[in-house]
Amino acid sequence: MNMENIGVENEIDPSELELLEFLVGEESFGINIAKVSEIIIHCDVTHVPSAPRAVEGVFMHRDKLVTVIDLHEILEIEKPERERTLLVVCDFDQVSVAFDVTNVNGIQRLKWAQVEKPPAISGNTENSLATGVAKINEKIIMILDFEKIVCDMNAGKDFEIGEVSEIYSPPEFDYSRKLLIIEDSVFLNKVVSDAFKKVGFTNISQFYNGKDAWTHISGLKGTELRQTLGGIVCDIEMPQMDGHTLVRLVKKDKELTNTPIIMFSSLIHDNMRQKGDSAGADAQYSRAQLSECIKTMIELMSER
C-alpha cells in the first residue's frame, strides 16, 4: 500500500496530525503518517550477522536497502501465529527502515493538543520509548520514539556531529545567552543539548513539547530579551503543541520576532520545508545535519 494513494501529505491544519494506528499484538501504537512511505506484506529478508536480536534482516525494495526491525521484540510482545505480518516502511534522513507489526488499523486525524506527554510513572527518561499518548474515543494510542529505536539498533546513520568543538564563532560571541532545545524524544533532546554544550553553550533549557516551551518563553517577555533569549532549536512533531505552531507564535510576537529559530527534525523534506518557511523558521535541518545546525545558530545569534 503506497501512502500517496491514501491521502498522505494532504494539506491539513498545522495544529493537526495524521497518525497511522497499528497493532503490535493486541496493543495500539502510532506513528506520524508523514514518516511512512509504504505498508507492505512481510517478505523474505537476508539475515545480518551479529545484528541485534530485534533486527530481522535486510531486503531490497524499490532499489533501496531496507532494514527490518521487529517491534514485537522491541516491545516484548508475543508475535501472533499467522502466516504474514505487515511491514511499515519509513524513511529517516534518507535511511529506509521497515517495522514489523501485527496489523494496521488505519489513519487517525487529531489535534496535537490531544497528544499528551507520557505519564512520569512510565519512565520519562533517556531510555523511554514513548514520546506521546493520544486519546481517541476512549482508546489510548502510544506514540513511539522511532528515531531512538533506529539508533539503538544501529540501523540508521550516526548523527554527523563532526568536530563540533572546532566550530568557529566570533571572539565576542556570548555563549551565556539562553538557548532553548525543544524536542519530545528524551534521547534526542540529550544528544542535541550535549552537542551545543560541547561547543561552549552554558545556558541551555530543555523542553519536551511546544506548549511548555511557549509558557516559558512567554514568561521572558518584558525582560531584556536580547540578552535573555538567544535562540531556539525546535522539533516539528511534539505533544500538546507542534513546532510549526510554536514558530508562528514566536514570530508573530513583536518582542520575540527577531529570535532565531531553527527547526531540527527527521521530517525535513520539500513539503515540510515549505510549512517551516511559511511559519517563519530561520533555518531547517535534518537529523544528520546537527553540525550545520549549530554553525547556523551561532551565525544567527551573532547577527542579532
Image (cartoon, helix red, strand yellow):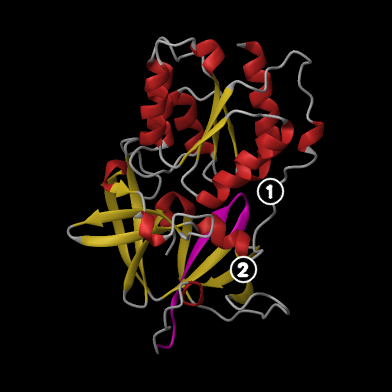
Name the image quarter holding the N terminus. Answer: bottom left
Q: Residue 6, can we see it?
A: no
> From what the image shows, is residue 27 above or below residue 5?
below
Q: At numbered mark 2, what does the secondary structure look like: helix, strand or loop?
A: strand
- Front-most of 277 and 253? 253
- Front-most of 214 and 4? 214
Residue 76, percent across and down?
A: 46, 77
Kindly identify the amino acid type of the residue bearing the numbered disc 2.
Answer: Thr
Residue 27, percent across and down?
A: 33, 72
Q: Residue at x 36, y 66 (%)?
A: 22
For marks 1 and 2, the one nearer the N-term is: 2
Q: At numbered mark 1, what does the secondary structure look like: helix, strand or loop?
A: loop
Mark identifier at residue 159: 1
Disc number lying in front (1 or 2): 1
10 Å neighbourhood of mark 1: few (<14), some, or many (≥20)? some
- Which region is colored magenta? 82-96
- On the rendered structure, is 284 left or right of 30? right
- On the rendered structure, is 243 left or right of 6? right
Residue 189, percent across and down?
A: 55, 44
Residue 105, percent across and down?
A: 30, 67
Does the magenta portion include 265?
no
Q: Residue at x 35, y 60 (%)?
A: 142
Query: Are the residues at dot 1 and dot 2 in contact (C-beta closer than 8 Å)?
Result: no
Q: Magenta part mainly helix, strand or loop?
A: strand
> From what the image shows, is residue 181 above or below residue 29?
above
Q: Which residue is mark 2?
A: 67
